[in-house]
Amino acid sequence: MNHWAILVINIKEKEFHVYDSLRNKDRPDILQYVDILRRYMKGRGIDSANWSLRYPDPCPQQASGVDCAIFTCKYMECLARTDTQGFPFTQNDMPTMQASLAIHFIKAYFNAQECSERI
């Protein structure tokens, strides 16, 4: 199964946060990634051995089997933006978000084409 989720290092709360649109807590790969992050952080002088793994709530959940990438991108966008509180989207917003992402990539493609023509 290919499924997207995001694992976040929350240094302020000393926790690892998983944002998963299927909220599958039985994924062994998440614990493997946490282990990798713990080793990485230890190498930089941060002891995260006692940090907990948390699945923050509320976290919008998908109703289809194909939208995990869009959900994950939206989680990242909302977490990175300082002007957004929580996750202001649901499964119902997916068609609009898919179209918006498609337009973004189409514009990026044509911008890249334009730049390469100038060279």
Image: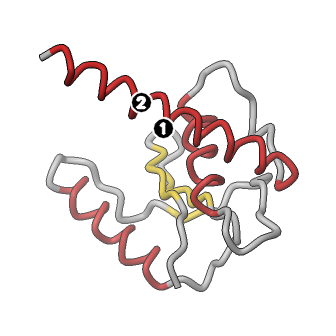
Counting from the top left corner in percent of width and height, residue 26 is at 60, 85
| On screen, residue 113 above or below 96 | above
Nearer the observer, 78 or 65: 65
Counting from the top left corner in percent of width and height, residue 7 is at 48, 58
Secondary structure beneath dot 1 equals helix
Q: Residues within 10 Å of mark 2 (few under 14, many from 20)?
A: few
Describe residue 63's horizontal placement relative to residue 79 as left or right. right
Please give the label number shown on residue 118. none
| On screen, residue 28 above or below 18 | below
Q: Quadrant of residue 13?
A: top right
| On screen, residue 28 above or below 20 | below
Q: Which residue is mark 2?
A: 108
Q: Which residue is mark 1?
A: 105
Looking at the image, the residue that sits furthest to the top is 118
Describe residue 68's horizontal placement relative to residue 9 as left or right. right
Counting from the top left corner in percent of width and height, residue 67 is at 67, 62
| On screen, residue 45 above or below 78 | below
Q: Residues within 10 Å of mark 1 (few under 14, many from 20)?
A: few
Nearer the observer, 44 or 28: 28
Counting from the top left corner in percent of width and height, residue 86 is at 75, 37
Three-letter amino acid code at the position of disc 2: Ala
Could you tell me which quadrant the C terminus lies in?
top left
Question: Could you tell me which residue is drawn at 87 percent across and 51 percent down?
Answer: 92
Q: Check whether the beta carbons of the residues at disc 2 and disc 1 lie within 8 A of each other.
A: yes
Three-letter amino acid code at the position of disc 1: Phe
Q: Quadrant of residue 59?
A: bottom right
Question: Could you tell me which residue is drawn at 30 percent across and 62 percent down?
Answer: 38
Secondary structure beneath dot 2 equals helix
